[in-house]
Amino acid sequence: MTRRSVIGEGTGVNNTPQNGGHPGDTPAPKEEPDAPNGKVDLRKKVTLLRGISIIIGTIIGAGIFISPKGILKNSGSVGMSLVVWIACGVLSLFGALSYAELGTSIQKSGGHYTYILEAFGPQMAFIRLWADLIAIRPAGLAVISLAFGQYILEPIFMPCGVPEIAIKLATSIGITSVMYLNSMSTSWTNRIQIFLTFSKLLAIAIIIVPGLYMLFKGETKNFENAFEVSNIKLTGLPLAFYSGMYAYAGWFYLNFVTEEVENPEKTVPLAICISMAIVTFCYVLTNVAYYTVMSAEELLASQAVAVTFAGKMMGNFSVAVPVFVALSCFGSMNGCLFAFSRMFYVASREGHLPEVLSMIHVRRHTPLAAVLVLYPMTVFQLFVGDIYSLLNFMSFLRWLFIGVAVLGLIYMRYTRPDMPRPFKVPLFIPAIFSFTCFFMVFLSLYSDPVNTGIGFAISLTGIPAYYIFIVFDRRPKWLQDGLDSLNRSVQIILEVIPAEH
């Protein structure tokens, strides 16, 4: 396939008589104000504040508001659960620092995919990409979107339950609006992400402030015997860590958009460190607030901890909590889509996905096709199948491949010692983190071998797919002509052209 634009000459960026065009030509599309020299590519619009908002806005989803009880259940005591929250924050910081080194030494977007590609080659990277494309990303986006649909409608239907069809319709509207936003403007995507991040932090503050006020007034009975040895479950601690690491997941999303970050050598490490400090601080204090107002038994019995907390503390104002949870979910949807659309963009540029996914809209300067590619699969999974079981047997793959990417950092220290590393972490940090990832993978194999085995089998289908779609290029002429024609048609419909690098 050639890399030429199939959109007519009239859409050339500088198509004016003053620049060599002809009076009869179609005028050039209006460029964004900051478009340098009329180039059609992805702009460096991710500042430090926007980078922090991407990370915080993606990490803080519905989990901290709905169900932090998994850690309490598996740790066995209030004190140990708080220790696990802190320890998971530190471990996540280790992973984030490792990714900061990878992001500053390999200044390409794409996150896990790019780092595995650089360290271990195209086949391993394609397997990761394949698992992402066919299951992990659509299912993950669908689940967080379902939480959005549930909580945005809850104030309307209170005290009754929300009908299932209403949840799915609201979810579909939410997904569509996020897709539209990411398709239309990178700047507005980032601005709205900043607003949603501040909304999340406000929601957490609404929980923390009254909780700590009660604590300072002397409400400490729920912290008595917080480290009761007889209640601590050593066998459950690995599962508690698994839940905690899942709650912190999202620190890696800025690495998916490295090429759009201003001054990535400084911005990426700084944004990661600031974000992880804020998130860990918020998570620990939020749990302290929960325990101040609710006993361990009440927290374990609650299906939505923040709603239960608000009902006890705020009376009628508690109706606002589901709205904040919905905004939080919307921010996670927005941040996730913004990030992993760039992974598909980079994978297409590397030849692992159809060429049109690495093309840019001629006016909007967004990777329109890469943004939209997940839309049909996500909506399809909303209405059919059990998304939660899919997530259960695919979740271990996330930690497997993150562990492989961080292991690649250690591997490249020895195989590529001369690689520029503007930000370099002590070797024990990636070593501890990759060991933790592989331990969680082993734990999944031990605790749930059936679902984990199914997920592993799904990922292994990426091996034949790699040879069929990538290695084997002797396609029949009629098939290749059909694919080229389809590619050109999509390019014309979406008004996208190859990016200028």
Image: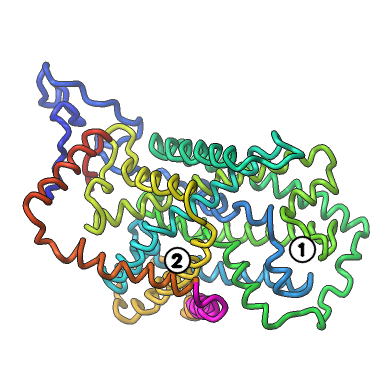
Name the residue tied to disc 2: 99
Q: Residue furthest right?
A: 218
**How far from the left and from the top, in percent, is residue 390?**
49, 61
Q: Would you place residue 333 above or below residue 70 in this image?
A: above
Chain part drawn in magenta: 432-450
Name the residue tied to disc 1: 300
Residue drawn at x 91%, y 65% is 221
Residue drawn at x 49%, y 46% is 383
- 10 Å neighbourhood of mark 1: few (<14), some, or many (≥20)? some
**How far from the left and from the top, in percent, is residue 292?**
84, 59
Q: Is residue 429 visible?
A: no
Q: Would you place residue 243 above or below residue 355 in this image?
A: below
Give residue 332's mark.
none
Q: Is residue 242 visible?
A: yes
In terms of depth relative to the viewer, which is nearer, 377 or 49?
377
| Helix, strand or loop status at disc 1 | helix
- 10 Å neighbourhood of mark 2: few (<14), some, or many (≥20)? many
Q: Would you place residue 48 above or below residue 123 in this image?
A: above
**How far from the left and from the top, in percent, is residue 357?**
28, 47
**How far from the left and from the top, in percent, is residue 153?**
65, 37
